[in-house]
Image: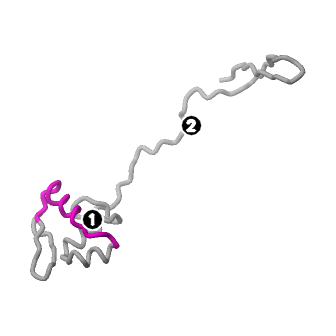
Amino acid sequence: MTKKKEKVVETKEQPAEVEEVENVKEEENSSDKVVNTKVQKKEQSRFGHRIDSIGGKLDSLLSTGSSLDDMCVKLNVGKGRVRSHMKHLRQDRGIEISEEKGGIIKVVGK
């Protein structure tokens, strides 16, 4: 749709004048924008965390069994991060985690 628009031109010597501008296209809607309605889901771990995230990697280590120190070293995270993830798995996901002999922590339920 074309509309006539007015353009204000002001110079130091003369007061503001109104100048007509013709054939100016005006966007009526934003249909030109591309909206991504499909969200690609990343591959998830056994317990619903993205595989490439710290949570997904912790899920993998807990599934196979690993010590707290080993998990911290392998993922370069602190013990609190590992403990809080295990707490999340217990409370929010209902997963049973046990500590075996030698300090090996492993998922035993679900």
Q: What residue is shown at x 25% (from left), y 65% (from top)?
A: 80
The quadrant of the image that shows the N terminus is top right
On whether residue 92 falls in the magenta region, the answer is yes
- Disc 1 is placed on an element classified as helix
| Type of amino acid at the residue the image marks with label 2 | Asp
| Callout 2: SS | loop
Horizontal and vertical percent position of residue 39: 39, 49
Q: Which residue is mark 1?
A: 81
Q: How far is disc 1 from disc 2 in space, using C-alphas?
A: 44 Å
Magenta range: 76-96
Towards the viewer: 78 or 87 = 78
User: Which residue is located at x 12 percent, y 57 percent?
Assistant: 94
**What is the x, y in percent for residue 108?**
10, 69
- Give the label on residue 32, or none: 2
Residue projecting furthest to the bottom: 102
Pick whichever, 29 or 82, lies toward us.
82
Residue 89, quarter of picture: bottom left
Amino acid type at circle 1 is: Arg
Question: For this view, does 48 lie left or right of residue 11?
Answer: left
**What predominant SS class does the magenta segment belong to?**
helix
Q: Is residue 89 magenta?
A: yes
Q: Residues within 10 Å of mark 2 (few under 14, many from 20)?
A: few
The colour scheme of the drawn protein is one colour
Quadrant in which residue 46 is drawn: bottom left
Label tally:
2
